[in-house]
Amino acid sequence: MKNLSKKSIFLFETIKIVNQKPLNIHYHIQRAKSCVKTDLKFDFKNILNCQEKGLIRAKIIYDECGNLIDVQYFPYELKKFHTFTLVNADFDYHKKFLDRSRIDKAKNGFDEIILVKNSYITDTSIANIAIFDNGWITPGQPLLQGTCRQHLLDNNFLQLQAIKVEDLLKTRRFALMNAMTGFLELKEFRFELHL
């Protein structure tokens, strides 16, 4: 592992590995390339060398100059959320920054949050969201452009639309999506306001 100097900005990608096979790697490479100042100085496919069977979460840490910092592997267990507290987000998270202190502060002990920016819905602390309104829609201005979200947009499963708080509160169908869960429609959910 390289020295984590405070002068660099660190980013990461979370990649789902099933039986030693990384999934949707193209989308992670694409996002990482868009986040660095120059080129990536490592090859995602060559650094992912997980020998574990089953479902694994890989965390690739790199800096804004494209240098690989570390690769970590963790067994994955799906977190279950039913209550989502809507909170204001007055910060930017357009890159998958390793420093998640602003998100953690916004979470403030809540089970899970939905971040609201300028009266519009963005994301939860760990996933993009979608609601059903004559088809699945996802916020046009998320906090983070997720890889699963992008895959679903590219395949016309999702459509972009600005989602206001009131739209979310009246939805009957709600889903989360990220690299690990894929698209996950929740059967039970409720929203609380803390704006």
Image (spheres, rainbow, N blue to C red):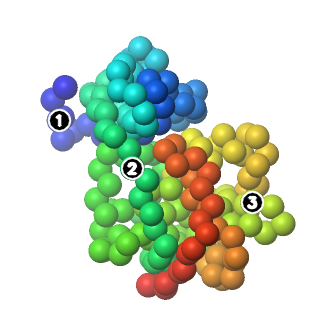
Query: Sequence order check: which comes first, mark 2 or mark 1?
Result: 1
Query: Sequence order check: which comes first, mark 1 or mark 3?
Result: 1
Q: Quadrant of the N terminus?
A: top left
Residue 150, how many percent across, how many down? 64, 43
Judge from the rendering whether residue 170 lies leftward or rightward of residue 32; answer left or right.
right
Which residue is denoted by mark 2 in the rendering?
77
Between 194 and 55, the residue placed more toward the observer is 55
Q: Residue furthest front?
A: 53
Q: Are marks 1 and 3 in contact (CB under 8 Å)?
A: no
Q: Is residue 11 visible?
A: no
Q: Is residue 155 visible?
A: yes
Task: Between label 1 and label 3, give the one nearer the viewer.
Answer: 3
Q: Amino acid at mark 1?
A: Ser
Which residue is denoted by mark 3 in the rendering?
136
Judge from the rendering whether residue 168 lies leftward or rightward of residue 161; answer left or right.
left
Between 78 and 5, the residue placed more toward the observer is 78
Q: Amino acid at mark 3?
A: Trp
Real-space Cα separation, disc 2 to disc 1, in angstroms: 31 Å
Counting other residues with Cα less than 10 Å from the Cα at mark 2, is it few (<14), some (14-19), or many (20 or more)? few
Q: Amino acid at mark 2?
A: Glu
Determine which quarter of the picture holds residue 131.
bottom right
